[in-house]
Image (cartoon, rainbow, N blue to C red):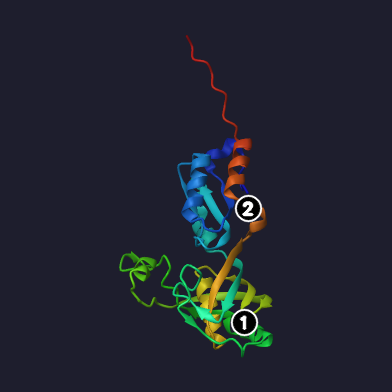
Amino acid sequence: MLENPNPNARPKGEIILINKPYGWTSFQAVKKVRYVTKAKKVGHAGTLDPLASGLLIVCTEQQTKGIQAIQDAEKEYEGTITLGATTPSYDMETEPNAHFPTEHINEAMIHATTQQFLGEIAQIPPLFSAIKVDGKRAYTLARQGDATVLKSRNIHIYEFEITKIEMPNVDFRVRCSKGTYIRTLAYDFGIALQSGGYLSRLVRTKIGEHSLENAVIPHDFETIWKENNPRPESTPQAL
């Protein structure tokens, strides 16, 4: 949970591994860490959408200087793609806007299709994203009905494994480069199967050498921090 737990080195800060709950924004997690630690500088190394859960790395004080290096590291995710429909946001933030057949899809086809997405591929980020377009967040434009198409970018998929199939739901594990949108991967995977698809579950399990199994939920972080950093007893004022 804490990469630098030495209280005497507090100005150097910590690298804190948070298990972000479903429904929380990354900003809420940062706000919680700032409130608990009283750190002056706090930042996170890679946003997780509110509808995703899992590993969020929060850095404090001087450790914030290493945020870019953490962001540049490979990421690993586990999740579920629901086939047979698409949504404007590519996940469950919005309701399905189109439905497609799935009767032609079998398990062999699903496993074989993952091969199309391995290696360096071009990917168009979803409009419901934090990318800026003419100074505005893309998700703001999307919610206003703007159908702007974002520019494609090259990303790298190192591993794409199907772990369970219970149609229309397909569970997967993926290891990828920074800048990869798993929502777009779900959408494109549905198209490759001559159907539709959207991301219905996502958990980030690894960022570089950091793993979700070493992370704590925000409530437990507050408890652990207070146990390891008790407030000094107040001294009586001199008369």
- In-front residue for pair 166/59: 166
How crowded is the residue under tag 1: few (<14 C-alpha within 10 Å), some, or many (20+)?
A: some
Up/down of 226 relative to 52, above or below = above
For image coordinates 61% across by 67% down, the residue present is 76
**Which residue ends up furthest to the bottom in the rendered image?**
104
Q: Which residue is the site of mark 1?
A: 114
- Name the quadrant containing residue 220: top right
Q: Please, which residue is most extreme toward the left here? A: 134
Q: Position of residue 214 (x, y in %)?
A: 66, 53
- Viewer-proximal residue, 49 or 179? 49
Mark 2 neighbour class, 10 Å CA radius: few under 14, some 14 to 19, many 20 or more = many
Q: Which mark is first along the chain, 1 or 2? A: 1
Please tell me which residue is depicted at 54% across the width and 44% down the height of the picture.
13
Residue drawn at point x = 61 percent, y = 85 percent = 113
Which kind of residue does numbered mark 2 sit on?
Ala
Residue sitting at x 30%, y 68%: 134
The residue that disc 2 covers is 215
Residue 121 visible within the image: no
